[in-house]
Amino acid sequence: MIGDDGFEKSGLTASARCVPYGRGRTCILVALFGAMSLADCASLDCTDIGDESQLAFNFNSVVSQHPNERLRVRACVDDVCRSTVFRKGQFPSVAFGEDVITDDEPRPVTLTIVDERSQVVFDGATTATPRKRQVNGDGCSPTTWQARVDTSGTSDLIATDS
């Protein structure tokens, strides 16, 4: 039978909740009635680092060949594309997040870069396979998916471990 206070009346057991905190897991004692085991809280040694799924395109090699030019960049994952104008001084990368990358399914990716004269200076395609990542330890949240592709030459798009 459960009393008005939310605790079981027969046996009066204690309850605890394990939550991520700092470098491990901490147990918060809700009530102290009877004996209680904290073994469940020690079963996972999780940290509390945030992370997000991402597939990133790094096109630094193209920028280094066109250092003073404004470049138009179009990157696609599956059928989802993003376009941007890259200017000198910006970090040469375009990323897709959790709205596109949700698991370890291999995905077709393309990257096209056009210079100020509307000349294609890079046009490449490959398949990228996101890798599972758990920055707080095995079995600890969050679980994210990471992939990266790098440019080489004028048409080589290379999937790399991120």
Image: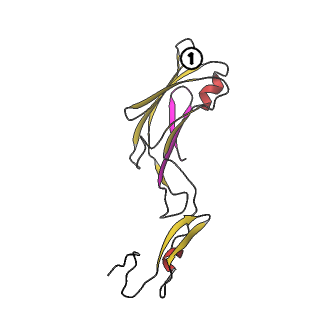
Q: What is the x, y in percent for residue 11? A: 39, 88
Is 152 colored magenta in this rendering?
Answer: yes
Q: Which quarter shows the N terminus?
A: bottom left
> What residue range appears in magenta?
141-162
Main SS class of the magenta portion in the image: strand
Q: Residues within 10 Å of mark 1 (few under 14, many from 20)?
A: some
Report the front residue among 72 and 153. Answer: 72
Residue farthest toward the front in the current orientation of the protein: 4
Q: Amino acid at mark 1?
A: Asp
Q: Which residue is mark 1?
A: 115
Q: What is the x, y in percent for residue 9? A: 37, 84
Vertical placement of 86 versus 46: above or below? Answer: above
Q: What is the x, y in percent for residue 32? A: 51, 82
87 left or right, relative to 160? right
Residue farthest toward the left in the current orientation of the protein: 1
Q: What is the x, y in percent for residue 127? A: 43, 39
